[in-house]
Amino acid sequence: MKVKIIHKETITPSSPTPSHLKTLHLSFMDQLVPEVYVPLLLFYPNPTTHEKSSILKTSLSETLTHFYPLAGKFQYNDSICCDDHGAAFVEARVNCRVSKILENPDAEMLKHLFPAAFESTQALTGHLLLVQVNFFECGGMAIAINISHKVADAFTLSTFTKIWARVAQGHPVLLPADSFGALTYLYPPQDFLNASKPLAEYTQEQCMIRRFVFDASRIAALQFKAASASVTNPTRIEVVSALIWKCAMEASRSNSGSIRPSVCSQPVNMRKRSGKPFVENVLGNFVWFFKAITVEGEVDLQSLVATFRKCMEDFKVNYRNGVSVELAYQTIKESAKLLEKEGMDSYTCTSWCRFPFYETNFGWGKPSWVSIPYALKNKFYLMDANDGNGIEAYVTLLEEDMTIFESNQELLAYASLNPSVIY
C-alpha cells in the first residue's frame, strides 16, 4: 500500500476567537497528560456524496470556531494560545481498494493513513489538530484524526467528531460557551507541573501492536467464567481487561523467568463522578485513574476481576467529591514510588467503549469501521466493535512478550486475532 499526499492546507476558524478567549490556561489534569497525539480512524467504504473534501473543510472551519483551542498553539505545560493558527488538513490518495485494508486491517499499515506519528509533538507538526482524508481507488475514504492529548481526552475527541459531523449536515451547534476553560477554574494549573521538559517521555522500544476482537457470545462466555461469589455480575470491560492483563503478565513472566509484581492502571471519566455541578460536558482532560496490583505467583481470571471491582469501588469512595489537588499530588507521589520498584510490570487499559464514534455521519452515512491503532508500550485500548456488542482490543507489548501473548490459547479461546472487518 502506498499513500501519496496530494494536497495540504491549514484550516482556520470561520470566525475569529474573541479577545477574552485568546489564552486558555491548562488545568492540572491537562498538565499531567503526556504531549502525544490521540488517533482516530473512520472508514467510509461507499460514500455517495460528491465534493467530500469541500464539505469537510468548510464544516471543520465552522467547528473550530467552537473548538477554538484546537486551532491554537501549545505553550509548554502552561496554556494554549488561541490565536486561530489553524488545523492541518491533508488529502492523500491510496493505491488500493479500501477492502484490502478491511480484509486484513494490519495496525502497522494503518499508521500510514495518519498525518502525524502518535508520539509527535506540536513543535514537530506545527498543529494541535491534524486531519488526513485518504481516498482509495474504489471511491472509499478514511478520515484520520490526530488530536493533541494536551487539549483532549476521549470524551472531548468524541464530542468534537460529533459536532463536526452535525455541522457538515447543516445542523446547529449545541455546545455550552464555557465548555473549554471550566476545568481550569475547578482545577487550576500547578507550578510543580510546569516543568521545562516533559514529565514523562516515551522511549522508543521494539514493540508490536495487535488487534483482537471479542464477539458478544464469547464475551458472555467469558463473563460466565469470570463470575465468582465476590463478583457475581462482571461487566464486559472487567472481563476483557482482566483476561488481557492476565495473558500479558504470563508473557512477561515467561520471558523474565521470574514472578514479577504487576500493576494495571485504568483511566476513569470524572465528568459524572466529580461531585461538582455543571461539569458533565466540559471539554479538555477530565480523567483520573485507579491502579490494580497483583503480586501473586498464580493469577486467575476471577481474582483479577475481583481486584478490578474492588479498586473501582474504592475509587468511588475516595473520589466521591472529585479529585482535589492535594489528593492528586499524593496519588502521583505514591504512583511514582510504585513504578520505581525493581521488576514491576506496569500496564494501562483504557476503554473507549460507549463513545458514539460509529455515529459520525458527515452526510454520506455512518462509518463501517472505526479504529484506534494507538501503539504505546504496555497499553491496551478497548472500543466497541462495529456491531455495537463486541469489543476490539488494541494491545501493544514488547516484541518478545507479544510473541507469547498472541499465541496464548486461553486468550484465543475468547478473542480472534485480527479478523476481517465485516461491512
Image: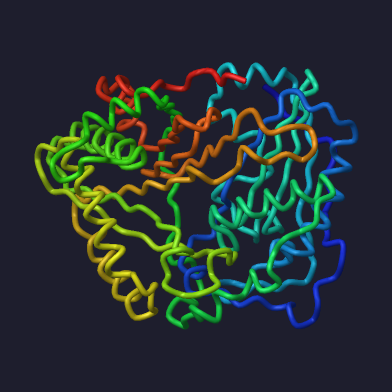
Please state the horizontal and vertical placement of residue 324, each as a whole percent of the image: 38, 78
Kindly identify the residue that appears in the image at 60 percent across and 63 percent down.
151
Colour scheme shown: rainbow
Q: Quadrant of the C terminus?
A: top right
Q: Nearer the viewer, residue 405 or 301?
A: 301
Number of numbered discs visible in the structure rendering? 0
Displayed quadrant of residue 201:
bottom left
Kindly identify the residue that appears in the image at 28 percent across and 69 percent down.
318
Kindly identify the residue that appears in the image at 46 percent across and 32 percent down.
392
Q: Nearer the viewer, residue 388 or 338?
A: 388
Displayed quadrant of residue 207:
top left
Please state the horizontal and vertical placement of residue 237, each as a whole percent of the image: 36, 41
Q: Nearer the viewer, residue 277 or 395?
A: 277
Please state the horizontal and vertical placement of residue 68, each as a whole percent of the image: 74, 66
In this rendering, position of residue 191 left or right of residue 262: right
Q: Quadrant of the N terminus?
A: top right
In this rendering, position of residue 54 left or right of residue 418: right
The answer to whether 90 is drawn above or below residue 275 in the figure is: above
Please state the horizontal and vertical placement of residue 11, each as a whole percent of the image: 83, 55
